[in-house]
Image: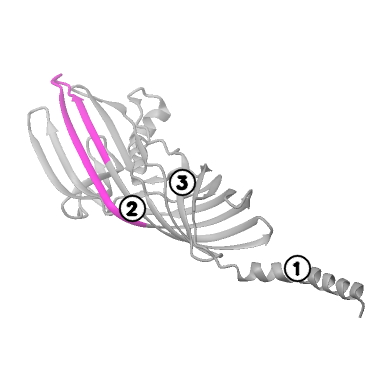
Amino acid sequence: MSKKKSGFLLTLLFILSLPSHFIYSEDIKPFKSRFSLKLTAGWGSALPMGDVNDCLDSFNNNKVFKEHRDYKTGLVEGEIRTLDDRFFHAEAELLFDLTSSISLGIATSPPIRKNNESSLTYTILGWAGPQITTWTFRPEIKISFPIRLSAYYKFSFIPRLNISLGGGTGFYFAKISQLLRIDQIPPSGNPAWYTWDQKAKRNFSLGFHGNTCLEYLLTNRLALVAEFQYIHSKIKGFTGSFKLETIYGDKHEMSGTLYYFASWDSSIAATYSSIEIHKTQPEGGCRYFEDIRKAALNLNGYSFKFGVKVRLF
């Protein structure tokens, strides 16, 4: 064989060996675990709130007050407003890749705090003169930074585009407080007032969530992400203290569990729902007669968020 033919064959074999060499190198390249930070924000469902808003709405729209408003008697003035249910959907999540397809994440969201103050005045016309009663409600809820743990499975259909499916459990911490002040002016004209101050908290409550995340790689360290998330969390078992004070100097304090119930209020001859702290579960009777249970704060909802994922190291 001539030197020219030998050189040509060697060059051809070298060229043909290049693709297989690169493919082989890609296949045997070891996987390296890495950390990433995902930052997202967007919009989603309103905060359901649960019993807190349900009770405020139930009092404001009880049968008696509603009839007075419908017939425009002028004996009901003002309204009791529910807490604003809008909030900012955002999340920061630290991710750790166990394999090229499986990763673990720990995430948190901004705390939520909602409060307001509103009053309603009801005048009862009697033979001795009018009796004027004003209810002032100051409810508040606080939800601290939650901690959500997730596991994800990632797969890819086309280059640079990945889809991750995941879910996990979350740990939630919340507080509920409500100050109720009742001012009364009886026909005699001697004013009186009463205050009920309740503060309850739940230091630890479990919830669950599911995620679907779409990820587009801009570089090997930066990606754009779009994520759908659903959270199921209903916090129960609030415990705390209840303080009663009157214009006459009377004071009473009690510790217990926060309960929800429907009751008959003889002062206005109407039924509405309330949340109150009791040492033991209230029993059915002349006042507590239906739907007696532990009060709950409902955080169920969904969100659509967009953001970035940054490879840290």
Q: Are marks 1 and 3 in contact (CB under 8 Å)?
A: no
- Circle 2 residue: 235
* Residue 91 badge: 3
Q: Residues within 10 Å of mark 1 (few under 14, many from 20)?
A: few
Which of the two marks, 1 or 3, is nearer to us in this view?
1
- Classify mark 2: helix, strand or loop: strand
Q: Residue at x 15, y 19 (%)?
A: 189
Q: Nearer the viewer, residue 73 or 146?
A: 146
Q: CA distance from mark 3 to mark 2?
A: 20 Å
The image quarter in which residue 15 lies? bottom right
Which three-letter amino acid code belongs to the residue tagged 1? Leu
**Lower position in the chain sequence, tag 1 or tag 3:** 1
Seen from this angle, which residue lies furthest bottom?
Answer: 1
Q: Nearer the viewer, residue 141 or 77?
A: 141
Seen from this angle, which residue lies furthest left?
Answer: 249
Which three-letter amino acid code belongs to the residue tagged 2? Ile
Estimate the x, y position of residue 107 in percent, counting from the top left: 43, 51
Q: CA distance from mark 1 to mark 3?
A: 46 Å
- Classify mark 3: helix, strand or loop: strand
The image quarter in which residue 233 lies? bottom left
- Confirm whether residue 291 shows in the render: no
Q: Is residue 253 above or below residue 151?
A: above
Which of the two marks, 3 or 2, is nearer to us in this view?
3
Magenta segment main secondary structure: strand
Q: Residue at x 37, y 49 (%)?
A: 146
- Circle 1 residue: 18
Magenta residue check for 54: no
Q: Nearer the viewer, residue 33 or 135?
A: 33
Q: Residue at x 88, y 71 (%)?
A: 8
Which of the two marks, 1 or 2, is nearer to us in this view?
1
How many numbered marks are there? Answer: 3
Asked whether, in this view, residue 28 is left or right of residue 167, the answer is: right
